[in-house]
Structure formats: C-alpha cells, structure tokens
Image (cartoon, coloured by chain):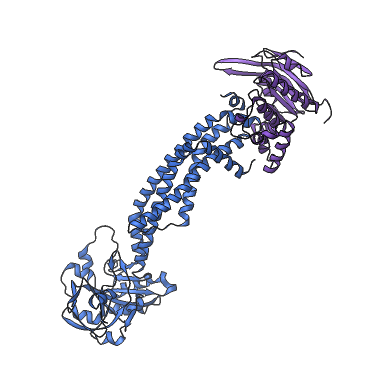
Chain colours: A blue, B purple
Amino acid sequence: MTSVFGKITESFQTFKTHRLRSFLTILGIIIGVTTVIAILSLIEGLNRAVSEQVQSIGSDLIFLQKFTWISTGQQDLDKLADRPDLTPDDAEAISKLPSVEIAIPDIDRRLSKLKYRDKEVSNPTIAGSDENYSYVNNHFVESGRDFTEDDILHRRSVGILGSYVASQLFPEESPIGKDLHINGHRIKIIGVFKEKGTFIGQSLDNFVLIPYTLHEKFFPRERGSIFSRVYGGYSIDIKPKLDKIDEVVDEVRELMRRRHGLGFDKEDDFELNTQQMLMDLYKNITRIGFAAIIAIAAISLVVGGIGIMNIMLVSVAERTREIGIRKAVGASNQNILLQFLTESIVLALIGGIIGIILGVLLAKLISAVSPLKAAVSFWMVMLGFGFSAAVGIFFGIYPARRAASLNPIEALRYE
Amino acid sequence: MKKHTVICRAINICKTYWRGKVAVEALRGVNIDIKNNDYTSIMGPSGSGKSTLVHILSCLDTPTSGEYYLEDKLISTYTDLELAKIRNEFFGFVFQSFSLLPRLTALDNVALPLMYSGVNKQARVNRAKDILAKTGLSDRMHHRPNEMSGGECQRVAIARALINNPKVIFADEPTGNLDSRTGTEIMELFDQLVEEGNTVVMVTHDSNVAAHARKIVKLKDGLIEHD
C-alpha cells in the first residue's frame, strides 16, 4: 500500500487539473462549515456572557424565598402570598446549620428616584441587610466603612451607596459623611461599594444598602397588594460551607419545614433558588433554537456532501481507463478505493479548512460590528474538521467503491 | 531460474462472455504452456480470441472454465486481491494504445507498479530512472505522454512493464499504433529483452511482427490451430 502522503499529493494533482470544478464542489462544504463555526462561536460567546452575568449574582449562593425563580406552568399567586413571611430569625437559625457558613436576611424596595440637592438617580433599589452582606455577596466596600454589628442592632441611620448611585449623586465630591433622604428619612452615608457592572443591561450598582432593621422602619410591611405579599418580604441569602454544598438544600429544607410546622403530608411553603436554576433555564430556552440553527447548517453540509459525491461519480466515469491501467499494473481494489476516498476526503477537508477560516473571520466581524461577542474554541475547529472529514468519507465511499469494483478489462476498453 | 521451466500452464481454458443476450465463446478449450525465456507470438484474425487469451494468461481476466497454473499454483480460483498482486509482481503488460496515465511524467508512469508493491519513493525513482535509461529515454523522464512521440510512449510502457522484473511480459499489438520504422525499433527492443533472458508473449496479426518470435501460436474461433 502506498503512503497516505503520496495519495494526498496525488489528489492535489487531480484538483489542479480541475481547479474550478474542485472549487465549486467544495463550495457547499465551505458554506456549511463557515455557518457552523460562526454560529457556534457566537452561541459560545453568548453562553459565556450569560454565565458570567448569572455568576455575578453570587456564584454559590442559595436564596430562600417565598417564590421560585423558575415556575413550571401557572403560578398561583394567592397561594404564594399566603405563605408565611421569612424573617431575620430564620436567617439566624439557618446560620447555625452545620453545612451553612452564614445566612443573612435580604430585603429590597425600589424607589422611583433618589435626590441629592440638584442631582438625582432613577429607580434605585433600597436594600436592607446586615454587616455580613458584603462578605456573603463577595461585594466589598471600596471607600468609607462597612456596617458593624452595632449599626444593625441599634438601627443606626447609616447607608452604603452602590457605585452607580455614588457617581450619579456625587460626581465631584466624596459622598462619605453626607446626608441622604430616603422615603422621608435621613441617613448618613458611611461608605461606597466597589463597582459590580451590569446584568442584562441593568446596573448592579444602582442601590443603597441600609441596615435591615432600619429598612423595616422606612418601609413598614403593609398587607397590601398580592404582589408585595409575594415578592416584598425577606429573602434569606445562604452561603454554604465549601465542602457541604450538597447537604445545604436538604438541611435548610428540613429546618424550615420544622420552623413552619409542616406535617409530612404538606408541601413546602418556601422555595430554595440557586443561580444554577437560571443557567438551566437559559439553556432550556436556547437549546431548541441552537439545535435548529445547527440543523440548518448540517443540511448545508449534507448538500455539500452530495455535491462531492456527484463530482466524484463524474470523476470515476472520466477516469475509467486510468482505473483499468492502474489495475493492470497491480493496483488492488483496495488501492483504487483508497485513492478515490482520499480524493473526496481531501476535497472535503480543504472545504472544511477554508470554512473554518471564513467562519472565524465572520464571527470576528460580527463581534466587531455588533454587541454579540464571539468566542472561538479549539473544539469548534476540531468539529469543523471532523464534520468535513466525515462528509468526505460518507459521500466518497460510494463513488470509491464503484471505482474499485470496475473490471480491469472493461475499464481498459473504455474510451 | 532454470531454462525452460514452465511458468504459465493453461489447460482447457474456456471463456464465454455475454454481449447483451448473446453468449460469445471467445475461447473454447485452449491449452498453452509458457516456458521461461520463451518468445511466443499469438496470431489470429480479429475475434479469434487472442486478446482474451492473453488477458487470462496475464490475470487481467478470469476463465469461465479450465485450469490455469502459474508456477504450479492453480490460480483460477484466486481472489481479486491475489490476482492484483500477481499482475503487479509476476507480469508486465504492454498495450497497443500505450495506456500511460496522461497526468504523470514518464518517470512516474514507469514507477507506478512499484507504488503498488509498497516500494518507497526514493527506491521507485531510482529504479524507474535505471529502466528508462535502458530503454533509451533518459532525456524524456520528466515529459508527459502528450509531449512524447508514439515510439517514445511505447518505450515508456515497456519500461513500466519491466520495472518489477516480471516473469512474463505480455504485449497486445505493441506496434499496432506505430509507423513501420518505429514499430521495427520497438520489435528490436523486444528481441533484445528476450536476448537478456526475459519471457515475452505477444499478440499480433502482423506476420512480420510474429516472425520475431521463436514460437507462433495461431488462434481461430477460440481454438489453437497449430502449435
């Protein structure tokens, strides 16, 4: 058997004699691989962006709330509203669980605007929590100081600004030590948080954090709208111990069922939310769309493959005499099979390589002119390679077999 | 190899093929021996079955019935793969129409059989150069068939047939496409090859050509007329 390299160089010679035809043959593969690579890298870019954003919520945190982030089907708000409110006491009890490092109460309320002299910021969130908020959320104070236990216990009128609020209200001076009015109450600014960025276009720094004890005073809980009864209460942010992440959900669940006095036949009246659920949701929503796009690209690969098969059949017919001569001088059926199969694989791979290059360029171009950021990974390149090789083999095998099975005498007589 | 050892022994070879619905009996029981260093001409009018016989002897085709021994091995039952190996290692073939690959140079055409014997590239090139020199084509090595004359092409084809040191060289009307002067040159080359100990079986309908051979086999209607 001849060397693979020899066969490949031989294939190239064949293509050289039919440049235009070879190019047109692989055009389908080029288009197919280009689309696959471009789409995959854009999807990958989108996935990475979303996963970064979701992680910014707090990568390992579990949120104990009255409602679930992800509802399957119709949610009965009335039922959710009737669930017992979660309390800072719950947070304290959860903190004592062996698998929990710490749990904090977290409550927030959105204001339409916040003013400081002639400056204002719209839709800020006024959040209430305790001195462990920055540690749990891995979001620390950049200037000024954090809360102390005393600030919380004594319900001191102090607040820490998110960096966006600070930059909007105090563009030229330090906000530390300044007074701010929230819902008619005065607080003293003691610190400013580090910048956190944006999530789905929303600033994560558009908030003011105050002690939750103070929050209760500023925004007394009214048994008003059903909406506020479901969403307005405390959420408990739970930070599990690193090696106990698997146990946390069960332990918290058991504790809360006990605290709420639920019998074994009763459903949970609380929900445990994780950012993993958001990722799963995202993946579920996008999976079908991505699958459809990939299917379309796959179809173009199949069309490309049919093109290759067609031209290989023509090539076998044209070279019948050559096949006869080769057989006469000792080529076995397998030699002929491999020769034509190599040709179709090399053809498809050339198309694949051009497609990979064009796909990467296309992805970069889209990245450059649109907010979508493409991310090309090595596995996509391998996939493009593998796909085109597979197309070459799959659609090349039939013409190659046909060539191999030619009778030498008939092939020699062929004119 | 000893002189006059039988290389090819065909016993009662028949070949029937179908042209549409009509059975054509090309060979109807042919017995023939090819011995070492034989110089045999197979003669006969067209349709006598001479080409078919030489195709069967050279393992390009298989007989419908009969036994064919190659060095005492019955090869009528060999598989395609085994026959390919025999064509490659035992036989050289020279065709009327040269049958060179148009895209390959003379050198590559000559080296082609060695590719299928698994000889490495450098050794292939070296052997092909030697053989081409012997057939007087050293200055045509890198030419393609369309850049050469008919006589040169046939010399390339002969070189190709010789490259694997074949036990038998088959030639099917080797001078049929050549003018008489070139034809004579080619026949002189064959004479020289036999002189050097090669075994040649030649199909021809030209008695001048057949006269070069030491043995003439006449075929008519698929049977040997006179041995």
Near-viewer residue (A160 or B69): A160
Residue B191, by quadrant, is: top right
Near-viewer residue (A50 or A247): A50
Near-viewer residue (A267 or A129): A129
Is residue A253 shown above or below B119?
Answer: below
Q: Tell me, yes or no, if residue A255 can be seen here.
A: no
Q: Name the residue rendered at 43%, 73% in the picture.
A: A242
Is residue A191 shown above or below B11?
Answer: below
Q: Does residue B197 appear left or right of residue A44 in this picture? A: right
Extreme-right residue of the structure: B2
Number of dots carrying numbers: 0
The percent position of residue A311, horizontal first and vertical second, equals 48, 34
Q: Does residue A131 appear left or right of residue B201 in this picture? A: left
The percent position of residue A342, horizontal first and vertical second, equals 55, 41
The percent position of residue A123, horizontal first and vertical second, equals 21, 70
Residue B37, by quadrant, is: top right
Q: Quadrant of the C terminus of chain B?
A: top right
Extreme-front residue of the structure: B139
Is residue A67 shown above or below B216?
Answer: below
Q: Tell me, yes or no, if residue A383 can be seen here.
A: yes
